[in-house]
């Protein structure tokens, strides 16, 4: 049986190399795209983790502030002006414990943030309380910091004033996340 010899034309001989290089380039682009997606997801995951940690730190600060207000013998002078009773604007930049010279709030340090307490004075007809029940209002502002993430939470607590002038029941009447 005679052997057949196949002859390729000269223009066909160099086609395999460019086609394989194009496929290699496509595979490299797909690989780079998937790596970029994975890196982006890793950054998002890290950011979400830091945000969650700062939120938990702020919640912990709220609990500490609530415990301080509920402690027997806790006394804090009421705000003297409307400006001093407003939500503390420095909560978006405060990083450590100390007293703010403008708002006069004393920021207390926690493991991963700070909290401050304001006595807003007495009020009547508050949410979650019987009508015409007098109560002393306290605002607790907590800042949780984790990495570059910051969470600011604020609650208003009411201490029901008993007939003898001493505090009695204690209840949260408002909660919000500022940042």
Image (cartoon, helix red, strand yellow):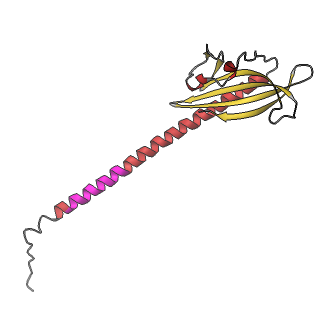
Residue that protrudes farthest toward the right in the picture: 163
Residue 43 at what x, y percent from top left? 45, 41
* Residue that appears at 83% across and 26% down: 135
Q: Nearer the viewer, residue 153 or 96?
A: 153
* Residue that appears at 41% across and 48% down: 37
- The quarter of the picture where the N terminus appears is bottom left
73 sits left or right of 175 in the view: right
Residue 40 at what x, y percent from top left? 43, 44
Q: Nearer the viewer, residue 141 or 131?
A: 131
Stretch of the chain drawn in magenta: 19-33
Q: Is residue 135 above or below residue 30?
A: above
Q: Which of 80 and 117 is in front in this view?
A: 80
Residue that protrudes farthest toward the top in the picture: 101
* Residue that appears at 10% across and 76% down: 6
Residue 178 visible: yes
Residue 108 at what x, y percent from top left? 65, 19
Q: In this view, does 94 lie above or below 10?
A: above
* Residue that appears at 70% across and 34% down: 175
Residue 97 figure quarter: top right
Residue 124 figure quarter: top right
- The quarter of the picture where the C terminus appears is top right
Q: Is residue 44 above or below residue 160?
A: below
On whether residue 44 falls in the magenta region, the answer is no
On whether residue 25 falls in the magenta region, the answer is yes
78 sits left or right of 50 in the view: right
Residue that protrudes farthest toward the bottom in the picture: 1
Residue 111 visible: no
Tell me which secondary structure the magenta stretch mostly adopts.
Answer: helix
Q: Tell me how many marks there are.
A: 0
Residue 123 at what x, y percent from top left? 81, 26
């Amino acid at each position: 049986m005679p052997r057949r010899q196949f002859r390729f034309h000269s223009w066909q001989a160099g086609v395999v190399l460019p086609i394989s290089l194009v496929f290699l380039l496509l595979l490299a682009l797909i690989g780079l795209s998937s790596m970029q997606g994975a890196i982006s997801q890793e950054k998002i995951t890290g950011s979400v983790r830091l945000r969650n940690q700062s939120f938990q730190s702020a919640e912990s600060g709220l609990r500490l502030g609530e415990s301080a207000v509920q402690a027997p013998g806790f006394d804090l002078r009421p705000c003297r002006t409307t400006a001093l009773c407003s939500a503390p604007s420095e909560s978006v930049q405060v990083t450590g414990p100390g007293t703010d010279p403008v708002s006069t709030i004393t920021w207390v340090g926690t493991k991963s943030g700070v909290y401050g307490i304001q006595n807003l004075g007495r009020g009547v007809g508050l949410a979650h309380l019987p009508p015409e029940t007098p109560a002393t209002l306290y605002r607790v502002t907590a800042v949780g910091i984790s990495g570059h993430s910051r969470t600011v939470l604020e609650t208003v607590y009411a201490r029901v004033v008993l007939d003898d002038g001493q505090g009695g029941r204690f209840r949260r009447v408002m909660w919000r996340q500022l940042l």
